[in-house]
Image (spheres, helix red, strand yellow):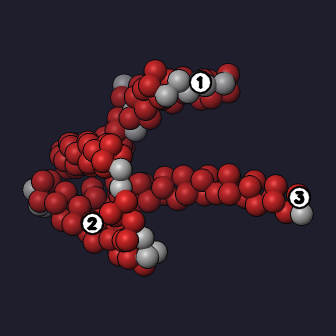
Amino acid sequence: MIDKKEGEVKSEKSSWLIYALLSAIFASLTSLLGKVGMENIDSNLGTAIRTAVVLVMAWVVVFACHKQHTLKDLDKHELLFICLSGLATGASWLCYYKALQMGPASVVVPIDKLSLVVTVIFSYFVFHEKLNKKSLCGFICLIAGTLLMLL
């Protein structure tokens, strides 16, 4: 029974990796499809349309998972940070799609992914998350690779 429980915990702990990989695939599709979709329309209009689709999709998932009743239980502090995150997302998307419309996707996307660098730095200072040697090496390679693409 202990082995089964450990297996379940191990499976649950590693399932984040599957979601992270799927996120990378969908983010790539977002960039590629967005580049084509923004070709002949205003980037702000395109962002608004995309956001409306995301909004509908998110609420469909909430209702499909029967989680709408938990809305009333949200902590005000957490709700504030979720709203601030939404504002940051909106600003990011508006800037991203304007850049994608004006510049080559092969350059815009790596620059946008420098958000990884900012996130790691903030995570270190705000959440006190540490990088091991292997992660630090990968982090440095990520920065170097992005900078090389810009040259």
Q: Relative to 60, is 6 on the left or the right?
A: right
Is 131 displayed left or right of 124 in the figure? right
Q: Amino acid at mark 3?
A: Asp
Quadrant placement of the C terminus: top left
Whole-percent x, y for residue 64 in the image? 42, 78
Q: Residue furthest bottom?
A: 64
The kind of residue on which mark 2 rests is Leu
> Residue tagged by mark 3?
3
Spatial CA distance of label 1 from label 2 is 34 Å
Q: Is residue 131 above or below residue 38?
A: above
Give the residue number, with chain letter if any, for mark 1. 130
In the rendered image, the vertical position of residue 74 relative to residue 121, given as above or below: below
Which amino acid, by three-letter code, is at mark 1? Lys
- Report x, y in % for residue 37: 23, 63
Label 1 vs label 3: CA separation? 30 Å
Between 117 and 130, the one nearer to me in the picture: 130
Depth check, mark 3 against mark 2: the one in front is 3
Answer above or below: position of 58 versus 150. Answer: below
- Residue ID at (61%, 25%): 131
Residue 87 visible in the shown view: yes
Q: Nearer the viewer, residue 70 or 117?
A: 70
Q: Which residue is disc 2 drawn over? A: 55
